[in-house]
Amino acid sequence: MPRRLILLVLFCLLSLSGAHAQQGARRQEGPAFLLSLSWSPDYCAHHGHERTARSQCRGRTAYGFIVHGLWPEEEPAQAACRPAGSLPPPLVERMMPIMPSAGLIEHEWATHGRCSGFSADDYFDRVSQAFLKVQIPDRLQHPDGLIVTDVVHLKRWFQEANPGLQSAMMSVHCEARGTNLREIRFCMGKALDFRPCAPAPNDQCPNGAVRIAPVP
């Protein structure tokens, strides 16, 4: 066999071996998550009149970013799914400061949590830990006026507040028919560390413009 052909075969074998090793490493990393933080003033502007939005939009607390959900990136096997059912009231109450809607909490458990392989307590512990992982920029803590910016600057504010966070680790989502901020999503690993999104994050704001409604 010609030397050049031998080298080509060896190169292909080494490439396949490397690919299998990378796949094995990814399997050992365990599940990865997508954390979605919703901008509550935008939600309340569209849904505040609904009965299910009462605690979030018409209570004593004015919210900025809240947890929309913590979603496993890969759909787990159905065998991992726990029976659907109501969550214990103390657990729901515990989550209300960062997910101020009992309906949202129940929905996220039924849709994403019960098939995650974690118990309800463990899953929502991870939700809380993921939320605490993200430091909200000072200017977005409780803005009392409309903020007009763009995706690049909005991401930069989060990067400045969160050392190690990169633009490729988050995506900005606006309302489908406008530039009002709806939510920001963060890609996280099993240990809830920021990591690059795969595939690359797809920001969804027309022309990159972002309008951030004030917290009432």
Image (cartoon, rainbow, N blue to C red):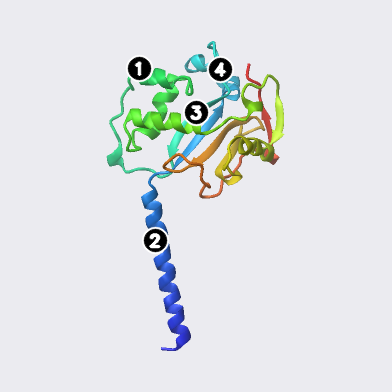
Q: Secondary structure at mark 1?
A: helix
Q: Specify whether 185 is left or right of 160.
A: left
- Report the amino acid beneath label 4: Gly
| Residue indicated by mark 4 | 48
Residue 107 at x, y percent in the picture: 41, 27
Sequence-wise first label, 2 or 4: 2
Decide which of 153, 42 is in the foreground and name it: 153
| Residue indicated by mark 2 | 21
The numbered disc on residue 67 is 3
Residue 160 at x, y percent in the picture: 63, 37
Residue 78 picture quarter: top left
| Residue indicated by mark 1 | 89
- Report the amino acid beneath label 2: Ala
- Judged from this view, the residue extending furthest toward the bottom is 2
The residue at 50%/14% (across/down) is: 54
Sequence-wise first label, 4 or 3: 4
**Dot 3: within a 10 Å radius of its alpha carbon, few (fewer than 14), some, or many (20 or more) residues?**
many
Q: For the N terminus, which image quadrant?
A: bottom left
The answer to the question of whether label 2 and label 4 lie on touching residues, with beta carbons closer than 8 A, is no
Nearer the observer, disc 4 or disc 3?
3
- Report the amino acid beneath label 1: Pro
Q: CA distance from mark 1 to mark 3?
A: 18 Å
Q: CA distance from mark 4 to mark 3?
A: 17 Å
> Quick check: 164 above or below 124?
below
Q: CA distance from mark 4 to mark 1?
A: 23 Å
Sequence-wise first label, 4 or 1: 4
- Judged from this view, the residue extending furthest toward the right is 148
